[in-house]
């Protein structure tokens, strides 16, 4: 029992779950009806189920490659679970996700069902989008951003305006810029197994340049759609400038340790920009004054900027440790 | 699955203060999210 609980916790991947929750909260806030905690909670159940489904089938498809890229950090590759159990967890999580989305209405249900279909096509053969270079870099962010954003949005408002879609496009485009960088960690195994990621095909310099272009376009879209006050505009300008500067350093870096710190710092800045947007949307919906909104955005920006600096200078404070050599099935 | 190797930083303390202020002001959900993001920012996450 405890092993299964542990398996679920490992599969939930806290970083991804928090990111999904962030996109869901932005979706609900963009709907403009204020915090609706009950609906947000059900949305989070739905997207947690979606995440577990996606992780299960991705781990099943990537078992061999994970042994090289992530030794001791994936339950299946380590032997903490076996393929049939992982498939059962995946199917059960998918069913839970659909049930929770159905409780929110047919639009969230349709959104989530589409997300499950795309997620399956991403990992599973014969489609296996994950092996298709640029298409993979475009599809994965769609799952990460659109599914939580639209599920949460449709849970509270049935109609979409063009500005809502421009915000979604901005989030999506900016996230492509970040997801391109995840392949730095996996370079060795990806090259070994013929996984044609953007980094494998085009190299470090072009990957960083492409990331900068996507980040710039996403930031511009968000600024155009969100009608920012001076505080959000300043926060985005600072976040964008720092991100581009870090990408320039990453383009010429030679140490894997420094790669990890730089990419983690870029991710922190990206999450900070998401939090700043969420702060603007939430405080506006709650009828806060402009100075109070600006103060919250400034605080979020300074804190996440400080954490990015700490990451750059000291590296991660907590680092995943390999799973113990515990086996689910006697061998 | 992780091991702490550094003391809580001033940025985390400032973040906790902001979380409390937002929660008291009624924005519980955004406060909780900021809390999780601040905790996540200590990890070497590429997302």
Image (spheres, rainbow, N blue to C red):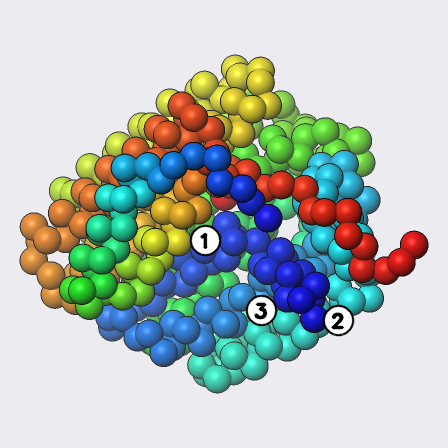
Which quadrant of the view contains residue B23?
bottom left
Q: How many residues crowd mark 2 within 10 Å: few (<14), some (14–19), many (20+)?
A: few
Position of the C terminus of chain A by quadrant: bottom right
At mark 2, the secondary structure is: helix
- In this figure, what is the number of numbered marks? 3
Residue labelled with disc 1: A19
- Horizontally, residue A312 falls left or right of residue A143, namely left
Q: Visible in this render: residue A281?
A: no
Question: Residue at left 49%, top 40%?
Answer: B4
Q: How many residues crowd mark 1 within 10 Å: few (<14), some (14–19), many (20+)?
A: many
Q: Visible in this render: residue A242?
A: yes
Q: Which mark is residue A49?
A: 3
| Residue A311 % position (x, y) | 41, 31
Question: Residue at left 56%, top 24%?
Answer: A257
Q: Which mark is residue A101?
A: none
| Residue B16 % position (x, y) | 27, 50
At mark 1, the secondary structure is: helix
Separation of residues labelled 2 and 3 (CA atoms): 13 Å
Q: Earlier in the sequence, mark 1 or mark 3?
A: 1
CB atoms of marks 1 and 3 within 8 Å: no
User: Looking at the image, which residue sits at the far right?
Assistant: A331
Q: Is residue A106 or residue A191 the one in the foreground? A: A191
Q: Are marks 1 and 3 in one subunit?
A: yes
Q: Earlier in the sequence, mark 1 or mark 2?
A: 1
Chain letter of disc 3 in the image? A
Residue labelled with disc 2: A88
- Horizontally, residue A293 falls left or right of residue A21, namely left
Separation of residues labelled 1 and 3 (CA atoms): 14 Å
Chain letter of disc 1 in the image? A
| Residue A278 % position (x, y) | 29, 55
Q: Earlier in the sequence, mark 2 or mark 3?
A: 3
């Amino acid at each position: 029992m405890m092993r299964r609980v542990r398996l679920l916790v490992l599969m939930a991947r806290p970083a991804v779950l928090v990111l999904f929750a962030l996109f869901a909260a932005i979706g609900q806030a963009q709907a403009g009806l204020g915090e609706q905690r009950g609906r947000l909670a059900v949305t989070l159940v739905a997207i947690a189920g979606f995440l577990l489904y996606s992780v299960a089938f991705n781990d099943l498809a990537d078992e061999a490659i994970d042994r090289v890229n992530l030794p001791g950090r994936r339950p299946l590759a380590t032997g903490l679970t076996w393929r049939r159990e992982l498939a059962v967890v995946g199917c059960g999580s998918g069913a839970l996700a659909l049930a929770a989305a159905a409780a929110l209405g047919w639009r969230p249900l349709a959104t989530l069902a589409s997300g499950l279909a795309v997620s399956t096509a991403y990992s599973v053969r014969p489609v296996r989008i994950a092996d298709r270079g640029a298409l993979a870099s475009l599809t994965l962010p769609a799952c990460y951003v659109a599914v939580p954003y639209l599920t949460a949005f449709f849970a509270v408002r049935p109609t979409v305006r063009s500005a809502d879609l421009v915000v979604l496009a901005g989030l999506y485009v900016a996230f492509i810029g970040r997801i391109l960088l995840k392949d730095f960690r996996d370079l060795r195994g990806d090259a070994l197994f013929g996984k044609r990621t953007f980094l494998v095909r085009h190299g470090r310099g072009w990957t960083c340049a492409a990331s900068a272009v996507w980040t710039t376009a996403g930031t511009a879209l968000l600024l155009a759609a969100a009608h920012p006050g001076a505080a959000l505009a300043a926060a985005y300008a600072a976040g964008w400038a720092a991100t581009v500067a870090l990408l320039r350093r990453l383009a010429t870096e030679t140490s894997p340790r420094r790669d990890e710190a730089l990419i983690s710092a870029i991710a922190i800045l990206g999450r900070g920009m998401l939090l700043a947007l969420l702060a603007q949307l939430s405080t506006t919906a709650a009828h806060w004054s402009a100075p109070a909104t600006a103060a919250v955005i400034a605080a979020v920006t300074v804190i996440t900027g400080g954490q990015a600096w700490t990451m750059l200078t000291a590296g991660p404070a907590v680092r995943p440790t390999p799973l113990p050599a515990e086996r689910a099935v006697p061998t | 699955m992780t091991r702490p190797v550094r003391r809580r930083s001033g940025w985390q303390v400032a973040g906790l203060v902001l979380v409390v202020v937002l929660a008291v002001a009624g924005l519980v959900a955004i406060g909780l999210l900021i809390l999780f993001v601040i905790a996540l920012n200590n990890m070497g996450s590429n997302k």
